[in-house]
Image (tube, rainbow, N blue to C red):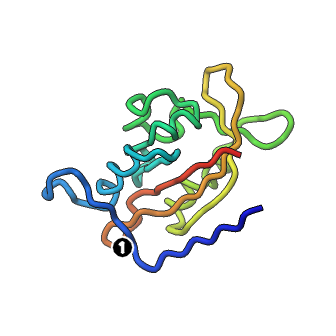
Amino acid sequence: MAHVELSLSEVFAPASRTAPEQESDNVSQWCVTVTLADEPCLLIDAKTRVVAISTAGCRLLCLGDPEDVIGRPLLAGGLRLLDFTAARGELTEQETDKIPPLLALHSGRLARGLLRVQAAGRNTPDATVDAISTPVLTDGTVAGSLTFFSEI
């Protein structure tokens, strides 16, 4: 099994393609990068609303098109989080608070974990994904989280 180490010595904030007066925070700056990414990734704001999601992220998480997801709360109707039991029951609210995108947002630290996801209201097979999340800071305060996914 491959071993991956992540170390950040300096925060990298990509250049935004918006006008300078619109570049108010790191969440806005990461928005373009996530939207254009080939990798499955997701950016949420401090209120857990989806700010940006890559097409590959939508495909992996069975969420349809990015336009259908952006602006909505992460767990609002489009995504079912399942436990790892044979019964595949939905996660409780207490358990969903511990998923990497939300844990990074609330703790202000890197978070990683496995998720079993299924599109809500659709008869699709579930997927197991590895999620790695990091908080996105603006002026020293957590303003969102950035998550990269990999299918297991």
Query: In the shown orientation, is residue 83 left or right of residue 98?
Result: right
Q: Residue at x 29, y 54 (%)?
A: 28
Q: Position of residue 31 (x, y in %)?
A: 34, 50
Say if 134 sits above or below 125 in the image: below
Q: Quadrant of residue 46?
A: bottom left
Could you say which is closer to the camera, residue 4 or residue 71?
Answer: 4
Furthest toward the bottom, the residue is: 9
Could you say which is closer to the camera, residue 16 or residue 76?
Answer: 16
Total tally of numbered discs in the picture: 1
Query: In the shown orientation, is residue 113 left or right of residue 51?
Result: right
Furthest toward the right, the residue is: 86
Q: Quadrant of residue 88?
A: top right
Q: Residues within 10 Å of mark 1 (few under 14, many from 20)?
A: few
Q: Residue at x 42, y 28 (%)?
A: 68
* Circle 1: residue type: Gly
Residue located beneath label 1 in the image: 140
Q: Position of residue 73 (x, y in %)?
A: 45, 40
Q: Position of residue 44 (x, y in %)?
A: 43, 49
Could you say which is closer to the camera, residue 3 or residue 63?
Answer: 3
Q: Residue at x 52, y 45 (%)?
A: 40
Helix, strand or loop at disc 1?
A: loop
Q: Position of residue 101 (x, y in %)?
A: 54, 53
Could you say which is closer to the camera, residue 80 or residue 5?
Answer: 5
Q: Residue at x 60, y 62 (%)?
A: 111
Quadrant for the N terminus, please.
Answer: bottom right
